[in-house]
Amino acid sequence: MKILSLMTAVLVGAVLIYGTLDMPKWGDPHSPANTHVSPYYLHHSLEHTATPNVVTSVLADYRGYDTLGETTVIFTAGMACILLLRAGRKRRGKGDV
Amino acid sequence: MFEFIVGHYNYWMYVGLMMIGFYAMMAKRNLIKKIIGMNIFQSAIILFYISTSVKKGDVTVPILEHAHDGHGAHAVDIMHYANPLPHVLMLTAIVVMVATLGVAVAVTIMIYRRYQTLEEDEIIMSIRRG
Amino acid sequence: MVAQIPILIVVIPLISSLFCPLIGLWRKGLCYFWTVFSLSLCALASIDTLLTVMESGTIHYRLGGWTPPFGIEYVVDHLNAMMLVIVSVISLIVAIYSKRSVEQELPRRFVYFYTVFLLQVTGFLGIVITGDLFNLYVFLEISSLAGYALIAIGEDGAPLATFRYIVMGTIGACFYLLGVGYIYISTGSLNMADVQQILPQLYHSKVVLTAVAFLLAGLAVKMALFPVHVWLPDAYTKAPSAASALIAPLMTKISLYVMIRVLFTVFKPYLSIELLPITDIMVWAGFVAILGGGIMALAQTDFKRMLCYVVVAEVGYIVGGVGLANTIAMQGAILHILNDAVMTIGLFAVAGIIVYKNKSHNISDFHGLFKKMPFTMAAFVVGALSIIGVPPTCGFFSKWYLIHGAVIAEHWAFLAALLLSSLISVVLFFRVIEIGFVFEASHGGHAHSTGHVATIDEAPLSMLIPTIAIAIGIILIGVYNQTILSNIIAFAVPKL
């Protein structure tokens, strides 16, 4: 079992490294990730949202729906924990831990 | 060749970290160790995303300078600020990761209450015994 | 107001899940009506969206008004409009059905069960409606977390099964996220339509090849494709009946939808058909899943567990059908997503009723069920006939298109698997039906319930009516399959 897991992990790692071979260099300012969508945020954030912190303006405005999803994830986790740990238990007695 | 390695070793580091986490998730028999492996795996992905946002040179955090000096939206030199988008994505992903961790630990607590152990082998033995 | 309907589909269950615990503080029982109410609104909104899409084509809805590659957008075309209706209507039916079962199995958890139930539906709908790769991941996690919670509160052994599901599910989601990261680093965009525009120049890049591999591997774990299905049977067998009736039909189907979306919207079809042998691999994966799922199902003595393996086999149908990569097979595969969702919920609803009445889902405890619950078992027979593929039921028609597609593609092995799987289903379900017809009185050992054998002891109406409705739905979808096919699915099939 351990050998099998090790082999799977190494295989997955090898595929991932194969994928990195064609990637732009680390820190390349002209990579697609740095030139396609993100300059728009840097250029227009102040004008559109009046927020100097671009991360904030993207988080709360351009991709605000993701943040709604994020808070929903937290709400889900909270409800899940209540459902799992509290709701099913008997009323608290003295010996109950 | 040397330049290639310098340009890519950062990605290989994250792959190594990911493999450690992945191995721990599959091979470890203790439930908490599996959860730790899960966290290492997810952290590796976060490192990967963040490393896509790096720009070399005279770069600072994506908080615009001179924002309030009256000029408003004057030309922003994008080579001067890091890419904000991966940071935003990873803020979301970190929260998702914490939430998954929370649910996983809650389930682990349920398992512990039922079987009084966190070793998978012992749990399976105690299920077989009925 | 009308223009805002696409967002309402997701927001209604989300907001009502927020109010659900508050209502529960006041009156516990109201939570159930609140859930049913909000899910019926949601179903109306998605039916309206489907009609709009059929009338005027694809809807683009910009969240916050930002233009697409910069903001997030909803893209609703025929395929996901159909999925929205499937998800919202099925979750509404399960919500109506679940009341008595939840009261019996989880009396203390009534309020929070419905809260998480609504969040689960929110996650499903959010996955289906979005046009953004990263947003899809966020909603995938919402639905997974809610699913973990709903499964873990099941019978003894459920937490351990859930833990395994969490480990596998997280691996699947992380692989998906890695795939998205690889796409992001090579294109700089997360919007599906935008990525499709940029990617063709990069199809020979190693980054993109790895991205495809990881997206599909992650989704394969989530959809329980045969070799990585190991989390599914344990988790769905031990889940509470209402939770397994919700999750079993929908979770796998939604992952299949995302797979179709990734293969044919994010990437152009010729990548997976011509440049890479992805579709060929998919047909063989489907072949293995159909036979593997079928054979494993034969070995089960537990009814719910048997159904789980049937689900695994059905996933193989759709994966293989998409892999055949011709229009007819693709139509069959998409029709089968609809049919399979309806058939699976029907069978799991029957399983829930049997658990409610009999306290057991072991097939050997099914003696005399036809006498005891004639209507429930009639619904069961309809569902079983549909899985086998007998003409008036919907399962026949999608299987027919899949077989036709396999003939066109000249893929005889897959054809053989399809036919063999029908045969396996016949054996599978007739074994259950046979046991159900045998009177318990003839088995002397079971003296404790001989007195009740001859009397009819049906399930409560709130469970029975949805189950019968599904059985009627199975036949209606079969009768009107041509209408569905020519009005919706013909437009939903990706242009090859």
Image (cartoon, rainbow, N blue to C red):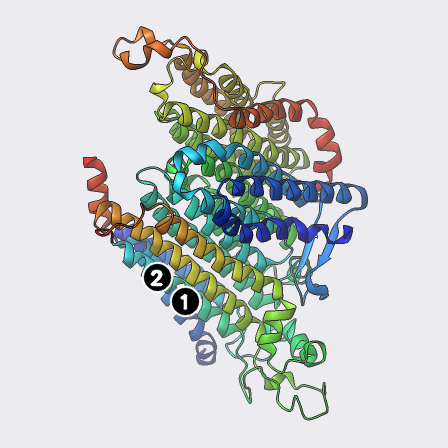
Q: Nearer the viewer, residue C422 or A44?
A: A44
Residue of label 2: B21
Does residue C165 appear left or right of residue C135 in this picture? left
Q: Is residue C359 above or below residue B37?
A: above
What is the chain identity of the residue bearing mark 2? Answer: B
Who comes first in sequence, dot 1 or dot 2? 2
Residue drawn at x 58%, y 76% as measured from the top left:
A55
Q: Give the quadrant of residue B14.
A: bottom left
Q: Marks 1 and 2, how far apart in space?
A: 9 Å
Does residue C446 appear left or right of residue C309 in this picture? left
Residue of label 1: B43
**What is the three-letter code of the residue carrying label 2?**
Gly
Q: Tell me residue C396's x, y (percent).
A: 60, 23
**Circles 1 and 2: CB distance less than 8 Å?**
yes
**What is the three-letter code of the residue carrying label 1?**
Ser
Seen as rendered, the residue at the extreme top is C442
Circle nearer the viewer, 1 or 2:
1
Callouts 1 and 2 on one subunit:
yes
Residue A94 in sight: yes
Does residue C114 appear left or right of residue C398 in this picture? left
Helix, strand or loop status at disc 2: helix
Q: Is residue C312 above or below residue C452?
A: below
